[in-house]
């Protein structure tokens, strides 16, 4: 018997009523753990990017290769910094409660 959208909605409401804040608590813990992962992933990714660039430049030390990897590194470093910042905010709990409507947004 296929489930309809109404059945799924009813199940979600029932699940939230039974589990209460346990679901939210576990989700917040998951967000904080993911924050740790993001904080670690940023510098590790930069390390492997630079290591790979050095290996590729050593294999083929022409100007084109050097420019290519320099561009990759320059573009990716701000992305990695953003990953670390995102992870820091997640670890601090800034994403524990996300707004569900426009009225919850603060200017």
Image (cartoon, rainbow, N blue to C red):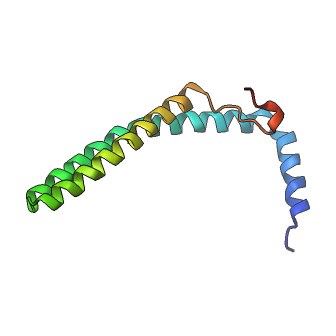
The one of 100 and 103 positioned closer to us in this rendering: 103
**Res 62 quadrant in image:** bottom left
Query: Percent from the top left, x then y, of residue 26?
Result: 66, 37
Query: Percent from the top left, x then y, of residue 18?
Result: 85, 40
- Side of 89 where 60 appears, left or right: left
The one of 26 and 60 positioned closer to us in this rendering: 60
User: Hey, which residue is sitting farthest bottom in the picture?
Assistant: 1
The one of 3 and 80 positioned closer to us in this rendering: 80
Please identify the quadrant where the C terminus is shown.
top right
Q: How many marks?
A: 0
Query: Percent from the top left, x then y, of residue 93?
Result: 60, 27
**Res 3 quadrant in image:** bottom right
- Side of 75 where 31 appears, left or right: right
Q: Is residue 67 above or below residue 34?
A: below
Q: Is residue 41 above or below residue 97?
A: below
Q: Is residue 88 above or below residue 72?
A: above
Please identify the quadrant where the N terminus is shown.
bottom right
Query: Percent from the top left, x then y, of residue 2?
Result: 85, 73
**Res 17 quadrant in image:** top right
Which residue is at a point 45% across and 38% down the rendered structure image?
Answer: 82
- Side of 96 where 37 appears, left or right: left
Which residue is at a point 23% across and 57% down the rendered structure image?
Answer: 68
């Amino acid at each position: 018997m296929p489930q309809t959208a109404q059945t799924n909605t009813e199940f979600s409401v029932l699940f939230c009523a039974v589990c209460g804040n346990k679901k939210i608590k576990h989700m917040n813990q998951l967000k904080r753990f993911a924050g740790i992962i993001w904080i670690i992933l940023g510098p590790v990714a930069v390390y492997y990017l630079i290591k790979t660039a050095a290996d590729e430049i050593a294999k083929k030390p022409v100007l084109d290769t050097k420019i290519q990897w320099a561009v990759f590194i320059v573009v990716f470093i701000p992305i990695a910094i953003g990953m670390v910042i995102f992870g820091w905010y997640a670890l601090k709990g800034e994403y524990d409660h996300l707004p569900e409507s426009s009225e919850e947004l603060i200017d």
